[in-house]
Image (tube, rainbow, N blue to C red):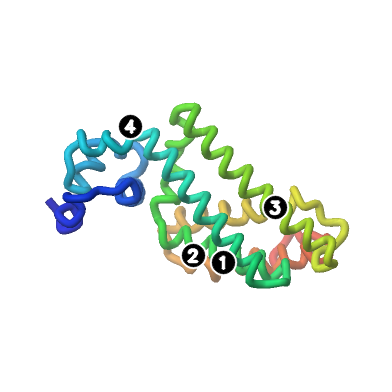
């Protein structure tokens, strides 16, 4: 039993189970996520685990929901703290990349294909999180158009999809390169062209 397992044996919480699940995914991928593995990681019995969650799909679903909620908190915080929409989006982009760097399990969860092989309920949960995330970004970009901070020809839905795509592209590149470069620094190379697009409506095909 690990030190972590001993510490959590007395009063296990759902959040601790989710943390353990994401840690297992980070180390070995979604396919290794089983009730036995999670219970062993925390130092509890499977019966105790099942008092909180029915199965690993339910754990994954709540994990995805928590990730979405934490990203939305970042978006709300940035939006409330800075009146400039473009600056807010930049800060959010950086926070998003930092969040991924600090939670390696997200990378394997998204790119392992485990989500797409999971049950319909989990796929719907992922879709719900992405749709909510995209809708909030669209609203923020639309607000920027109204204030004049973002070009009038910019399509909010397309711009929101592009921002999400930038995060996914940088995360995939980072993963394929063995996490060997700064995710934020590399992301800023994409951001420069994206910011130019936001303010002018012109999207360059080559990095500036």
Badge nearest the viewer, 4 or 2:
4
Give the mark nearer the N terminus: 1 vs 4: 4
In three-dimensional space, the C-alpha distance between marks 1 and 4, rounded to whole angstroms, equals 34 Å
Q: Is residue 24 visible?
A: no
The local crowd at label 2, few if under 14, some if 14 to 19, many if 20 or more residues have their Cα within 10 Å, is some
The local crowd at label 4, few if under 14, some if 14 to 19, many if 20 or more residues have their Cα within 10 Å, is few
For the residues labelled 3 and 4, say whether their Cβ atoms are less than 8 Å apart.
Answer: no
Is label 2 in a helix, a strand or a loop?
helix
For the residues labelled 4 and 2, say whether their Cβ atoms are less than 8 Å apart.
Answer: no
For the residues labelled 1 and 2, say whether their Cβ atoms are less than 8 Å apart.
Answer: yes
Is label 1 in a helix, a strand or a loop?
helix
Q: Name the one closer to the observer, 86 or 183.
A: 86
- What residue sits right under mark 1 in the picture? 94
For the residues labelled 3 and 2, say whether their Cβ atoms are less than 8 Å apart.
Answer: no
Position of residue 108 relative to residue 81, above or below, is: above
In three-dimensional space, the C-alpha distance between marks 3 and 2, rounded to whole angstroms, equals 19 Å
Give the mark nearer the N terminus: 3 vs 2: 2
Picture quarter with the C terminus:
bottom right
- What residue sits right under mark 4 in the picture? 55
In three-dimensional space, the C-alpha distance between marks 3 and 1, rounded to whole angstroms, equals 15 Å
Residue 160's disc is 3
In three-dimensional space, the C-alpha distance between marks 1 and 2, rounded to whole angstroms, equals 6 Å
Badge nearest the viewer, 1 or 4:
4
Give the mark nearer the N terminus: 4 vs 2: 4
Badge nearest the viewer, 3 or 4:
4
- What residue sits right under mark 2 in the picture? 98
């Amino acid at each position: 039993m690990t030190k972590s397992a001993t510490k959590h044996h007395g009063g296990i919480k759902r959040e601790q189970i989710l943390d353990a699940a994401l840690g297992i995914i980070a180390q070995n991928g979604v396919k290794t996520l089983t009730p036995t593995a999670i219970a062993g990681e925390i130092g509890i019995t499977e019966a105790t685990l099942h008092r909180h969650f029915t199965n690993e799909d339910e754990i994954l679903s709540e994990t995805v929901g928590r990730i979405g909620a934490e990203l939305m908190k970042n978006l709300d915080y940035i939006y409330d703290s800075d009146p400039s929409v473009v600056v807010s989006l930049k800060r959010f982009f950086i926070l998003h990349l930092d969040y991924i760097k600090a939670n390696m399990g997200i990378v394997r969860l998204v790119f392992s294909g485990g989500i797409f092989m999971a049950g319909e309920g989990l796929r719907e949960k992922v879709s719900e999180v992405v749709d909510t995330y995209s809708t909030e970004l669209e609203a923020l970009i639309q607000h920027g158009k109204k204030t004049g901070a973002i070009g009038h020809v910019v399509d909010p839905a397309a711009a929101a999809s592009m921002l999400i795509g930038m995060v996914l592209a940088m995360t995939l590149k980072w993963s394929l390169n063995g996490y060997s470069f700064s995710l934020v620094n590399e992301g800023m190379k994409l951001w420069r062209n994206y910011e130019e697009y936001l303010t002018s409506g012109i999207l360059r095909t080559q990095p500036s």
